[in-house]
């Protein structure tokens, strides 16, 4: 029987070339470390320059760490694979005998995630080309906001116009916001529909947007609308706040009810609003708690065997994605092993040169493919299809066979009225339910207690024997919104860094937890992200100490004329060339790569530093876990600068992150200028001096070059996104100047 999917290897065009690269760089790293160790010993033995030996020891430690990170990163670079799905074979085999699918959309806060954006995400997944009676869409509102409920209610009405329109004209993408943001002429040409039909839908979308936006602005649902759905009465009591409220489950559309017919004469999918109960004395576990409540609520309402979850800032860009994903689950030979199918996280609103290095291209195009080659990608929390069984804690067994015929409630409980189902669903979304059923968050559902709960959940699934599949089609299936300011980017990475580092330190550390259950390269693959946060210290050392050394005339690298400098030069040149190659082959521009290098340093010296401090202080019990949502709102002015690829420092903001960015940038510049003038004015009068400081000058010069946009923001720019004057002053007089003075006088 023909397979439903194919797997092929790809990668460095000539595998042999990759082998040469990997072997020579490994040898180079060993020589660097050896040369460094010899240098430390000889300086220690020389005695009189005692402090120099300590500085060399610090360099040795940093280089050991970078070498370790490099080796870990190679674990997923040896055999990346790509998957293809044969949707037409699936159709030929199954016809319309498809399994039911539940789709979970999670939102948390109507201020940072505007309801109109959530509505577009929901509409885009409701519009999948899939039998509507087999599709159920659930929105979890962790902010328990009447405004979000109102927006969803509006969406349930607009869906009756939108879904038949999508189907009639096969339009793509099926998020109305994304669709109507294209120019009219282009759309009309693509959609091939009558002008009246088209303007009717467009007008109606515009009106809905205005109603929702004005309700959000007034922070109030219009009185006359409240009477139109019983769900609004859930917010009548003044006791309902986002942190303290009863469980709310409202079925807005019952897709099984044949009397609900959309304007095109066919049924829309089921649409459910849920806000899991929150009480001050119960821990609600953030998104993981919401996901688990969704799993239970949906088991009462539709109980589909396949679950897709997406974030609320993501929309579906391909109405056939469900069928693609099913090819992996339903393949006769391998399908029964597949626990989840992960799609990459792609963004719509990246600028050409990706100023904040947010594209995740290398992760999407290289690392996740590499993990797939050695056992399966991590679960990254959005754009992922799971088996319900797997999410609920089932272990894999060789004889596992899913009976696709009898799962999901298509017409079950016809005698039960919606109200009864809602009551039942509310009881499983209550705090008391989890308190009495303590396996949730541990053995069942998404795991609790970590800011990146998705990753450990996926790891545990793989450790229970399931394979996972990474599917990265040419045409992207899900498109989300990337952070568009520096502050948002740094916040997001602080959370990533903290989450992955706490996994590394917890009992879920992939090397311990996965030992004997998943392959070693996959165990190491998970560590790549865990090493981000602790990398902050060696990076800071490398950014600060060689620059200061140059200022004072302390050589920290071998002389360029000595053979020991060769491995330094080779390892840096080869790894940077390879990283450029990897970036270019993943669709990043050269400037994008360069911007990525700047962000690499900024993230490591700020986000990951704070991530590490947060993690350690949490482990010591000094602070509790927080879950920072990256806001998806920017003002027009900021968007314009984002479009122009100007770094956004927010002229009035003065966070410690910004002071560090300014200080490290300034330090490189000051030390480069000071060092160069000193060397060129022949502070030591010969070429041997230049030779001793050559590598340090190159490093310091590269740091200064990569920071040029930071200097511009501090000194030249006039717009509202420049660096605040106070930040520059604080960095200059609070950090850089004292550091230089102390350094010059002490060492
Ligand atoms: C999104 O889908 C459209 C087709 O509707 C396609 O042309 C486009 O390339 C897709 N976007 C991405 C980023 O793949
Ligand atoms: C929501 C959001 O931030 N959208 C932005 C995406 O990026 C473009 C520029 O490329 C901005 O104009 C949008 O405002």
Image (cartoon, helix red, strand yellow):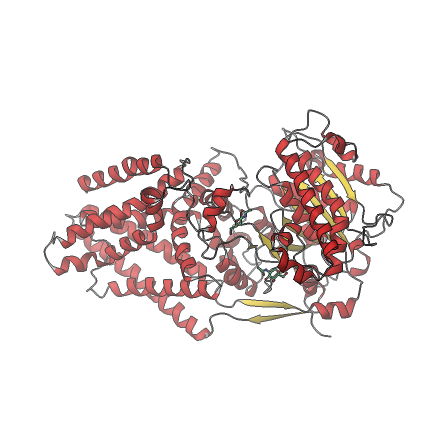
Query: Which residue is most to the right?
Result: 415
Work out whether residue 149 or residue 154 is closer to the camera in this orientation and state it.
Answer: 154
Q: Position of residue 734 (x, y in %)?
A: 29, 35
Judge left or right: residue 2 versus residue 80: right
Q: Position of residue 380 (x, y in %)?
A: 57, 52
Query: Which residue is most to the left?
Result: 685
Query: Which residue is most to the top?
Result: 238
Q: Position of residue 120 (x, y in %)?
A: 66, 48
- Residue 466 makes an appearance in the image: no
Where 527 falls versus 721 (above or below)? Answer: below
Q: Position of residue 544 (x, y in %)?
A: 29, 47
- Residue at the spot 23% in from the left edge and 41% down from the top edge: 740
Work out whether residue 212 or residue 654 is closer to the camera in this orientation and state it.
Answer: 212
Judge left or right: residue 677 versus residue 593: left
Where 535 falls versus 235 (above or below)? Answer: below
Q: Quadrant of the N terminus?
A: bottom right
Work out whether residue 148 or residue 703 is closer to the camera in this orientation and state it.
Answer: 148
Where 329 falls versus 507 (above or below)? Answer: below
């Amino acid at each position: 029987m023909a397979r439903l999917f194919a797997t092929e290897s790809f990668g460095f065009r000539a595998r042999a070339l990759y082998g040469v690269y990997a072997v020579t760089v490994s040898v180079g790293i060993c020589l660097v470390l050896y040369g460094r160790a010899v240098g430390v010993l000889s300086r220690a033995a020389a005695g009189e320059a005692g402090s120099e030996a300590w500085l060399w020891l610090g360099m040795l430690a940093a280089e050991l760490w970078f070498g370790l990170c490099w080796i870990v990163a190679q674990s997923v670079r040896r055999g990346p694979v790509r998957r293809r799905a044969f949707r037409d074979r699936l159709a030929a085999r199954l016809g319309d005998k498809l399994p039911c699918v539940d789709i979970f959309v999670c939102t948390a806060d109507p201020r940072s995630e505007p309801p109109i954006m959530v509505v577009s995400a929901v509409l885009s997944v409701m519009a999948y080309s899939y039998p509507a009676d087999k599709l159920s869409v659930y929105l979890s509102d962790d902010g328990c906001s009447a405004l979000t409920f109102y927006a969803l209610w509006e969406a349930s009405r607009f869906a009756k116009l939108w879904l038949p329109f999508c189907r009639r004209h096969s339009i793509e993408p099926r998020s109305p916001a994304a669709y109507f943001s294209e120019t009219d002429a282009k759309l009309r040409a693509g959609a091939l529909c009558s002008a009246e039909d088209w303007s009717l839908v467009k007008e109606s979308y515009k009106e809905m947007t205005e109603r929702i936006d004005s309700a959000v602005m007034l922070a109030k649902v219009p009185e006359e609308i409240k009477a139109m759905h019983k769900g609004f009465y859930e917010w009548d009591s003044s006791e309902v706040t986002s942190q303290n409220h009863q469980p709310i489950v409202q079925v807005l559309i019952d897709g099984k009810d044949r009397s609900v017919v959309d304007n095109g004469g066919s049924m829309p999918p089921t649409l459910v609003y849920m806000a899991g109960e929150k009480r001050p004395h119960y821990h609600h576990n953030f998104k993981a708690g919401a996901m688990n409540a969704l799993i239970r609520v949906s088991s009462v309402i539709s109980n589909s065997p396949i679950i897709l979850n997406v974030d609320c800032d993501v929309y579906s860009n391909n109405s056939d994605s469900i069928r693609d994903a099913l090819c992996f689950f339903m393949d006769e030979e391998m399908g029964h092993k597949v626990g989840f199918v992960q799609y990459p996280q792609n963004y719509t609103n990246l600028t050409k040169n990706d100023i904040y290095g947010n594209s995740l291209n290398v992760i999407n195009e290289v690392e996740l493919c590499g993990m797939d080659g050695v056992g399966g990608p991590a679960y990254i929390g959005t754009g992922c299809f799971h088996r319900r069984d797997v999410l609920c804690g089932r272990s894999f067994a060789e004889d596992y066979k899913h009976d696709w015929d009898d799962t999901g409630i298509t017409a079950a409980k016809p005698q039960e009225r919606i109200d009864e189902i809602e009551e039942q669903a509310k009881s499983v979304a209550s705090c008391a339910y989890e308190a009495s059923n303590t396996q949730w968050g541990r053995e069942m559902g998404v795991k609790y207690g970590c800011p990146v709960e998705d990753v450990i959940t996926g790891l545990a699934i793989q450790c229970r024997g399931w394979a996972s599949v990474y599917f990265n089609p040419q045409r992207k299936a899900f498109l989300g919104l990337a952070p568009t300011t520096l502050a948002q980017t740094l916040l997001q990475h602080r959370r990533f860094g903290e989450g992955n580092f706490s996994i590394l330190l917890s009992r879920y550390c992939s090397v311990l937890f996965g030992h004997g259950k998943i392959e070693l390269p996959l165990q190491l693959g998970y560590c790549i992200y865990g090493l981000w946060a602790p990398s902050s210290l060696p990076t800071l050392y490398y950014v600060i100490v060689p620059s200061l050394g140059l200022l004072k005339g302390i050589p920290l690298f071998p002389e360029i004329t000595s053979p020991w400098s060769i491995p330094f030069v080779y390892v840096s040149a080869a790894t940077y060339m390879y990283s450029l190659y990897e970036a270019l082959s993943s669709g990043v521009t050269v400037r994008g790569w360069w911007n990525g290098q700047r962000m690499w340093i900024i993230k490591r010296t700020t986000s990951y530093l704070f991530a590490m401090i947060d993690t350690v202080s949490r482990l010591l019990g000094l602070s509790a876990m927080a879950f920072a949502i990256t806001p998806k709102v920017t003002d027009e002015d900021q968007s314009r600068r984002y479009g122009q690829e100007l770094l956004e420092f927010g002229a009035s903001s003065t966070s410690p992150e910004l002071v560090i960015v300014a200080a490290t940038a300034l330090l490189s510049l000051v030390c480069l200028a000071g060092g160069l003038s000193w060397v060129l004015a022949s502070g030591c009068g010969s070429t041997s001096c230049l030779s001793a400081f050559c590598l340090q000058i190159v490093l310091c010069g590269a740091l200064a070059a990569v920071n040029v946009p930071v200097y511009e923001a501090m000194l030249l720019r006039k717009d509202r996104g420049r660096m605040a004057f106070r930040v520059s002053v604080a960095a200059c007089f609070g950090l850089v100047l004292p550091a230089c003075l102390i350094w010059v006088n002490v060492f």
